Amino acid sequence: MDELKFRSVDLQQLSNQVSHRTDGLSSSTLVLRRGQSFLIQLKFDGRPFNSRQDKLIFKVILGSLSVQIPISVSEQPSQWSAVIKQGVPSLNSTNALSVLLFSPASAPIGVYTLSLTIETRTSVKKTHPLGQFTLLCNPWNKADSVYMSSEDLRMEYVRNDYGVVFKGSANNNSGRPWSFDQYEKGILDICMKLFQLSPQYQADVNRDVLKFSDPIYISRVISAMVNSPDDKGVIVGNWSGDYKGGVNPSNWSGSADILKQWSQTQFRPVKFGQCWVYAAVMCTVMRALGIPTRVVTNFNSAHDTNGNLEIEEYYTETGEKLSLSRDSIWNFHVWVECWMKRPDLGQAYDGWQVLDPTPQERSAGIYRCGPASVKAVREKKVEAAYDVPFVYAEVNADVRTMITRNGRILRTIMDTKRVGALICTMKPGSMKMQNITSEYKNERDFSMLPAAAGGPGGESIRGMARGDDSRRVIAPEGIAVSLSLLKAPVMGENISFSITITNGEAVPKDLKKHVNAQSKEYNGNPISAFWEAHDDLKINPNESVTIKHEILFREYALKEVREDYLINLAVVIEDVKSQKRELATEEFNITSPNLDIQVENENSVIVNTQQAGTVMFKSPFNVPVSGELVVLGSGLLEAKVEMSVKLQPGETMKIPVKFIPKMTGSKMLHASLTLTNLPTVLRGFKTINVKSA
């Protein structure tokens, strides 16, 4: 009788990845989701397979973990199993055998090696390598701890490869496009490398791979590995303003360039990143791993260094902010939320969990943060793991503001509503803002906060300043001062604002008015004032006066007020007789004009068919500008388009762009123009629905 001889295996990569919803993910291996069967076909030489005399045993290996899987008569969902699939037509061969392999929904994720051992009555058993497969989490499987019930949300938070990150301030924010790039060539393989390079894996492979089944553990490893202070992580942070030897964080537009550079330089950390870069890259990794993830922005985010849930700020008597406290309030801070079960806390705390890869404070000795249950933060359950007290302070700390002179405190003002003024993410199926403040906070009046911001179709995203939401303080003596922006500040335009002073007493008053404008990084204290105004004025009994001010474009354009910098505007009103002082402040960003992207026949864009688009911009600046234009589109452009641009005042540019979509579904074409003689970056994007041929 002929011997049963193994000839080859067909892992049926295309059909398996379509059924596992991993199609498009680029890897050197087959890509699968745990808790779901996959079909392979074995081919033999000699006689056909005979179940009575032949024994087939599969083996999967992950690190030092291995499982033997003999052929069984039925699926066993709770463990690795294999069954012969009947009725599957062979490929012109009677010696082909189709087998369904099952992985449990609790299997560790990672890159597995698959082999087959054949035992027959007439020959020595032989083992044959079948290849490798990458196993990911499965939010489509109810038994998986990252299961999400809504198909629309699974598509948004796992499959979608682009989005916007909201930046700026609560009253004047904008959404900048970001390409998560999880479908770009080799990105998934790079993401899997994060596990192998983690200190925990390096210290004890055997113990570590067993933990890869738990999204809590997975997310803590990734949170630590995206930053680099204490491991071979991906990104070096830099908030100094000096980016020599690296890339200005504002110039990144997608995750692929960062992850590829990290891999291609033998895993040397990439220079440089700031909070939104850390968060966006972590979103890419977690979506690639199959864990539903979204990027979240917290406006007026507190960094409480001493754990007293209070932030101290100091001003001079003339309104200049001082750097006297280790605490800080970031005008915005960006993290991610991942969706998972929390068996360690109980079912009530399942759902969204805060994870923050920006290296601020150590968690169990490592720069990482989370997963902190959003529900635990809302309920002030500060004893809950992980890092709930730190996140609670970020959204709920009180602010103690002190006016000082020669080290003596002249006035103290408490503000319980400034921190966590607006917490938001991108609305599913849209490029607009979704206000999720109420998911973190339950004791605030949210009626003054914008539910959403955005232009028609979500193509232009910008919040507007509102005068009714200015900082206002009323003193017992009856003097009140408020500060309001008259319109949302835009680069190239003057900054217009008004100061309203009210005398609530029945006597006239002599006052001194001090106004200061200071530029600042979004996460730190301001530098010295670049604009100021000081005046004496009289105010009648029970009178209210409004004084308008304007900071000219030329007065701020070259004063280190660049993208991702903000302006701290402050006014101090001094009662000459009593020497009482009142303070009003406003911190805001200056948004950039938008680029406009148009696509020909945008309602009939077909996969694998060349399409034409145009990037347009009319210069609003009163000086000539020059810069570098970059156009990107994951799944649309094979490589980024780069060119130099020069524009005269009022001149319009029209740059044609040709692209060939490689994937169906919603995609994003986005462009950035980094100006070299003005401190700003102009951006624009266009969402495109690519249809099948």
Image: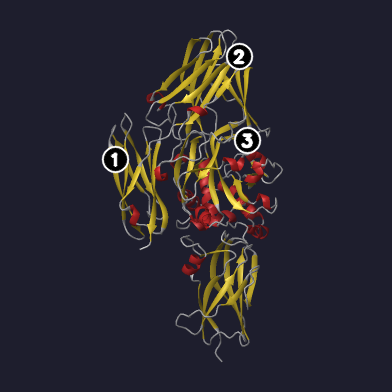
The number of callouts visible is 3
Q: In the depicted view, which residue is nearer to us: 370 or 498?
A: 498
Quarter of the picture holding the C terminus: bottom left
Residue type pointed to by label 2:
Glu
Circle 2 crowding by C-alpha within 10 Å: few under 14, some 14–19, many from 20: few
Circle 1 crowding by C-alpha within 10 Å: few under 14, some 14–19, many from 20: some
Vertical comparison of 307 with 234: above or below: above
Which of discs 3 and 2 lies nearer the camera? The answer is 2
Q: In the depicted view, which residue is nearer to us: 28 or 197?
A: 28
Question: Which mark identifies residue 477?
Answer: 2
The earlier-in-sequence mark between 2 and 1 is 2
**Residue at disc 1, secondary structure:** strand
What is the quadrant of residue 203 in the picture? bottom right
**How far apart are the two marked residues, 3 and 2, measured between alpha carbons?**
30 Å
Residue type pointed to by label 3:
Asn
Residue displayed at 45% across by 17% down: 547
Question: Label 1, on which residue?
Answer: 653
The earlier-in-sequence mark between 1 and 3 is 3
Q: In the depicted view, which residue is nearer to us: 47 or 663?
A: 663
Task: Give percent across and percent down for residue 412.
Answer: 63, 21
Residue 234 visible in the current orientation? no
Residue displayed at 62% across by 18% down: 411
Vertical comparison of 513 with 302: above or below: above
Residue type pointed to by label 1:
Met
Residue 212 visible in the current orientation? yes
Question: Label 3, on which residue?
Answer: 396
Quarter of the picture holding the N terminus: bottom right
Task: Give percent across and percent down for residue 655.
Answer: 30, 45
